[in-house]
Image: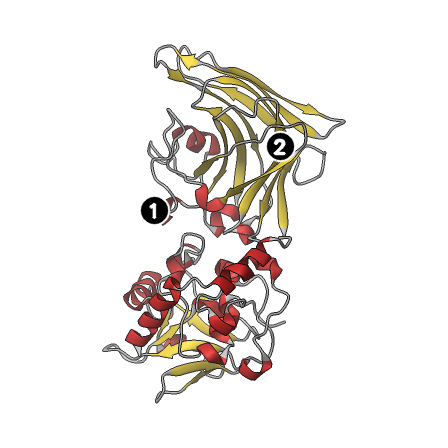
């Protein structure tokens, strides 16, 4: 049973059918929910004081200003980046705003979106950063993770097209890293290679500082900024239906929107008749896929990071369709032991004490596990430690029933 789940998952991940790509293209055209972080229109909760900061290295000659056009409701970042004579390398200028920014955790897996225009569009050193999970944002955004306790300032590059009109620049959260060189601004570790440097839902929930940089490239800089917004992946909001065809639908209702752990951003990986479905619809409700599973180790994806989002208390996992409680973990073991058990198999793994038995239906002969409202949850796979429920995170990421 375990080997079949692995084979199916690997085979599914290798299959990128034309129909799935077409469906995904349609999804990308849909509007996604946005959470404004910084504006210059006086709005409560998103208007912060931004201060311009110059390269502090001895002999640094870069300089700039940041002002607000009150009538136009935008900020103006202006200046010039010059070589630091002692280093014979470009310095930087930046503008930074501190405060309690809105909770953007629901946009993990999406983008930071800047509405900007520039008369220096050819400038090659534009960057944006945000600080979270750090006691001192200014310290973290000076050290870039290269000195002790300076993690938590996530930085990414962006460029601006030429023209007089406002442009919308999308910077994927997966392109940010909190490990970068304070001398050049270049990443020393990439999110695609090391999940430890990626933004998490927890960090996006507690942003303390937003910065815009001109760094690592010589030249004059003029950038006008209308807004900085965190935006969900478009696929999160785009599906018109939350149900497989009736003949194959095992669930009693539609899959919930905005599932926990960023699960709603995932699409079907099997192709065929379920190609246009979300991962949760396909795995949890589509009878054609009842012997299949979500990709192994999905819980470790950089934009999901299940265990980074759990604290040391007991977490309740709810049905992704009807919202009934299914599992409570860890119980009678530590969070580390829960994580180790999950890593051993590749899917979230629960023990008897953690199962809400009245809502979880286990067929010990076939190994199929479903919920009281018909949601396919995963497999029952006992090991030498006893009964074990190995679940698809896609199906246990719901919100509690109201």
For label 1, the residue is: 193
Q: Quadrant of the N terminus?
A: bottom left
Residue name at image x 38 percent, y 63 percent: 13
Q: How is the image coloured?
A: secondary structure
- Mark with earlier residue (1, 2): 2
Foreground residue, 15 or 228? 15
Residue 107 drawn at (x, y percent): 55, 51
Q: Is residue 63 left or right of residue 298?
A: right
Residue 234 drawn at (x, y percent): 58, 54
Q: Secondary structure at mark 2?
A: strand
Q: How would you rate the neighbour count of disc 2 (Cα within 10 Å): few for under 14, some for 14-19, many for 20 or more?
A: many
Q: Is residue 100 left or right of residue 344?
A: right
| Furthest residue in direction front, as rendered | 18
Q: Is residue 17 visible?
A: yes
Residue 135 quadrant: top left
Q: Quadrant of the C terminus?
A: bottom right
Residue name at image x 60 percent, y 28 percent: 162
Residue 375 drawn at (x, y percent): 51, 78
| Furthest residue in direction bottom, as rendered | 365
374 lies above or below 313: below
Q: Is residue 119 left or right of residue 143?
A: right
Residue 291 quadrant: bottom left
Tell me the number on the disc at residue 116.
2
């Amino acid at each position: 049973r375990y080997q079949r789940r692995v084979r199916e998952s690997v085979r599914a991940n290798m299959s990128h059918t034309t129909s799935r790509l077409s469906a995904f293209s349609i999804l990308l055209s849909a509007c996604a929910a946005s959470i404004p972080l910084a504006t210059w229109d006086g709005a409560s909760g998103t208007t912060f004081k931004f201060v311009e900061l110059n390269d502090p290295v001895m002999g640094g000659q870069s300089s700039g200003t940041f002002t607000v056009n009150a009538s136009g409701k935008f900020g103006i970042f202006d200046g010039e980046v010059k070589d630091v004579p002692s280093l014979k390398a470009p310095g930087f200028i930046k503008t930074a705003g501190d405060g309690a920014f809105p909770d953007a955790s629901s946009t993990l897996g999406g983008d930071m979106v800047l509405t900007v225009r520039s008369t220096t569009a050819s400038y090659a050193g534009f960057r944006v950063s945000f600080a979270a999970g750090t006691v001192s944002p200014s310290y973290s955004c000076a050290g870039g993770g290269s000195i002790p306790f300076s993690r938590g300032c996530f930085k990414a590059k962006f460029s601006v097209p030429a023209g007089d009109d406002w442009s919308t620049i999308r910077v994927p959260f997966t392109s940010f890293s909190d490990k970068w060189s304070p001398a050049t601004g270049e990443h020393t570790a990439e999110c695609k290679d090391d999940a430890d440097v990626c933004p998490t839902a927890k960090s996006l929930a507690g942003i303390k500082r937003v910065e815009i940089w001109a760094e690592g490239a010589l030249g004059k800089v003029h950038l006008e900024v209308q807004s900085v917004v965190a935006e969900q992946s478009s696929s999160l909001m785009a599906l018109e239906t939350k149900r497989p065809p009736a003949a194959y639908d095992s669930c009693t209702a539609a899959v919930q929107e905005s599932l926990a752990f960023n699960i709603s951003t995932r699409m079907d990986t099997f192709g065929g008749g379920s190609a246009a479905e979300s991962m949760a619809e396909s795995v949890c409700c589509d009878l054609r896929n009842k012997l299949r599973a979500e990709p192994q180790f999905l819980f470790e994806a950089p934009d999901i990071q299940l265990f980074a989002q759990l604290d040391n208390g007991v977490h309740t996992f709810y049905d992704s369709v009807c919202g009934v409680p299914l599992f409570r973990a860890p119980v009678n073991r530590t969070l580390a032991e829960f994580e180790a058990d999950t890593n051993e198999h590749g899917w979230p793994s629960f023990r008897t004490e953690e199962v809400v038995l009245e809502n979880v239906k286990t067929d010990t002969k076939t190994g199929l596990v479903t919920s009281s409202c018909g949601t396919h949850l995963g497999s029952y796979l006992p090991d030498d430690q006893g009964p074990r429920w190995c679940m698809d995170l896609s199906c246990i990421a719901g919100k509690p029933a109201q």
